[in-house]
Image (spheres, rainbow, N blue to C red):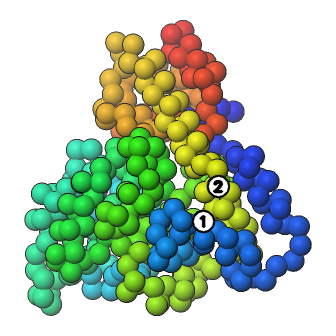
Amino acid sequence: MRSFASDNNSGVHPRIIEALARANCDHALGYGDDPWTKEAIQKIREQFSSGCEPLFVFNGTGSNIVALQLITHPYHSILCAETSHIYVDECGAPMKATGCQIRPIKTTDGKLTPELITPYLKDFGVQHHSQPGAIYLSQCTELGTIYTPEELWAITTLAHKHGMLVHMDGTRLANAAVALERSLAQLTVECGIDILSFGGTKNGLMFGECVIIFNDKLKREACFVRKQSGQLASKQRFIACQFSAYLSDDLWYENACHANRMAALLHKELKAFSCVRFTQEPESNQLFLTMPRPLIDKLLEEYFFYFWNEAENEIRLVTSFDTTPEDIAGFIDKVKKS
């Protein structure tokens, strides 16, 4: 089966499989006291900053709840776009884990701005109201759009001015870095981000995420929050070794670059059809578009993808590190024949 449903549906990159096999060669101490974890931590510090603190966790939701617990108290509110993953797709886990109120903000493109955030910065010190405590950003956003460094700086500056902290969900950070031709550090720590959920499963890893702490004040309690959240892996080397391979020899870059190129090719081919209308400007490896429902139904006979807004016949197509030109040619051929 070939799918445009999600980059989660893709396989695992061969170099990641090789790294897992090497880590499986012998016994090793558990819970991160192993050479693979030490190597991965060093690789992450080389990419982001020498002073950052990486914490490996099992999955994306786990990464987000660990990060958000570290930057909030239960009386806080967390501001996010109304399309954000923590508000739409995590079954209330961030609210349950943090006790915080989630405040969704309406956007046209999935991106927050200081102008959109400012009306929610109120009631500070009023005991009857949840206190604005954190801002959650997705890079790339759930609509495939990308924050520039300037946009990120504007948000983190506003947040810090009001004593708030900023968490970036970087599940597709690699795709954003490739699209903007910026380093991973230039889109995170150098923009004032306090804490990052750094993902790789959408870009060739098998499993696992990494919470990367940039704000020194958050580091002391981090390991306890991870443990209490059920996110400390006993055989942590199998998460860590993947990140070492991912951050070696530009694998993260090559994979994301390929996924973005395939999305650009798919966009080029689809926009030639008069019945296709793109609802978001393609910036990464996610495409949002509408087409007639009968055509969608015919495509679903052979390809799996998700509706984004079924009432509007809006669908999402996602390319991956292992999407091929042949995949796209087959999809386009089906569009032509339908």
Classify residue 255 by image quadrant: top right
Nearer to us in this view, 174 or 86:
174
Q: Position of residue 23 (x, y in %)?
A: 80, 66
At 34% from the left and 46% from the top, the residue drawn is 146
Q: Residues within 10 Å of mark 1 (few under 14, many from 20)?
A: some
At 65% from the left and 32% from the top, the residue drawn is 2
Q: Position of residue 338 (x, y in %)?
A: 51, 12
Q: Which residue is denoted by mark 1 in the rendering?
A: 43
Q: Position of residue 157 (x, y in %)?
A: 20, 68
Task: Tell me, for residue 248, which label it has, or none.
Answer: 2
Earlier-in-chain disc, 2 versus 1: 1
Is residue 154 placed above or below 221 in the rendered structure?
Answer: above
Q: Position of residue 96 (x, y in %)?
A: 42, 77
On the rendered structure, is 18 left or right of 83? right
The amino acid type found where label 1 is placed reads: Lys
> SS of the residue at dot 1?
helix
At 51% from the left and 62% from the top, the residue drawn is 47
Distance between the alpha carbons at the discs numbered 2 and 1? 8 Å
Task: Tell me, for residue 60, which label it has, or none.
Answer: none
Residue 322 appears in the rendering: yes
